Image: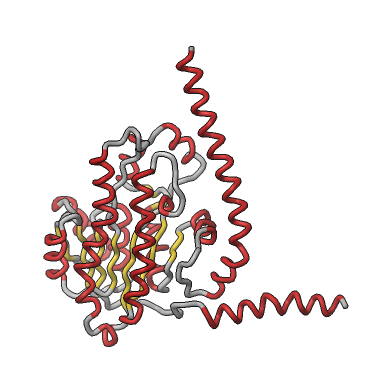
Amino acid sequence: MASLLLLLLLLLPLSLLLALFLIVRPRPTRVPIKGRHVFISGGSSGIGLSLARQAASAGASRVSILARGAAKLDEARASIRLATGIDVSAFSADVRDFDAVKEAVDAAGPIDVLICNHGVFVPQELERQELEEVRFMVDVNLMGTFNLIKAALPAMKESRPERGPGSIAIMSSQAGQVGIYGYTAYSASKFALRGLGEALQQEVISDGIHVSLIFPPDTETPGLVEENKRRPEVTKILAGHSSAMQADDVARKALNGIKSGTFIVPCNFDGLMLAIATAGLSPQRSFIMAFAEVFGAGFMRLVGLFFQWTWYGLIEKWHAEQNRSKAS
């Protein structure tokens, strides 16, 4: 009897693994970087600059970077040339301006790997934040991504079978997986990218183009320095339990995810847990990861409830202290 029970305990997960191997979609793939044209927005600093440097080192035939500031683009080109010996193409454009983006993309030529890395973040409680700042984040983070993909997609699809699989990678944030105090507008713009990516993957899969959504945590970049100056006090308290990653490490994780065609690309252990907890109906290429999602979702929901209990406790405590200070 014990042997039969043990056999059943082994057969059930093995049967599930086999079923998942058969049903996960899209199917596993490899998207090479070597010999390809990699185009990176927000490529003049931070994660984008690290991505450009690593793509050049990985043997990309061409690397193009796009950003608003011409001076920072020149500095980025020089630093990449110094680090890799490779010259990259640089294009100055505001991602909110479709015509300027289209002109830059057309000048760069057909793209194999498009990395939508641009983004802005101005933390503030919604009640205190000006709507202009909300529009700014939505326009850059969301509409800028639409503009870039819309501009690049026609040429990306041309002769794709002969050129090999392509990739569209979208830089979201862990704040695009879970809402955080003070991130109301930012989280809204980053959550929207997931819907964009899920629908887009269905539209371009038959063209051999694979979508990746990258979810980095706080990352040591010039943007984080400015963000910390504006963070509400409660946000600082909630974020105090996590450490920031280095831009090079995020770029490495991102490129590995792009090369494997992974749809959800976490960058650290917390991100992996969030990926399991929020898997939902997202596409999944790995039957092993699908297995972890099936078995881990319920447990991660429990872990998430404990996190929410902690966060709301901290928020209540902070407001109580503020009310006592006002009363005194």
Is residue 39 positioned above or below 218 on the image?
below
Residue 94: image quadrant is: bottom left
Q: Residue at x 33, y 66 (%)?
A: 169
Q: Is residue 81 left or right of residue 279?
A: left
Q: Count the labels in the image.
A: 0
Q: Quadrant of residue 159?
A: bottom left
Quadrant, the N terminus? bottom right
**Residue 234: image location, x then y, percent:** 45, 34
Which residue appears at 39% of the width and 73% of the height?
259
Answer with left or right where residue 65 lies relative to residue 287. left
Q: Position of residue 182 (x, y in %)?
A: 39, 39
Work out which residue is located at the far top of the displayed protein and give it.
Answer: 328
Q: Is residue 226 above or below residue 166?
A: above
What's the coloring here?
secondary structure
Q: Residue 309 in the image: x percent, y percent?
A: 58, 41
Image point 16% across, 62% down: which residue?
101
Residue at image location 21% in from the left, 66% down from the top: 64
Q: Residue furthest bottom?
A: 162
Q: Quadrant of residue 105?
A: bottom left
Q: Residue furthest right?
A: 1
Q: Nearer the viewer, residue 224 or 182?
A: 182
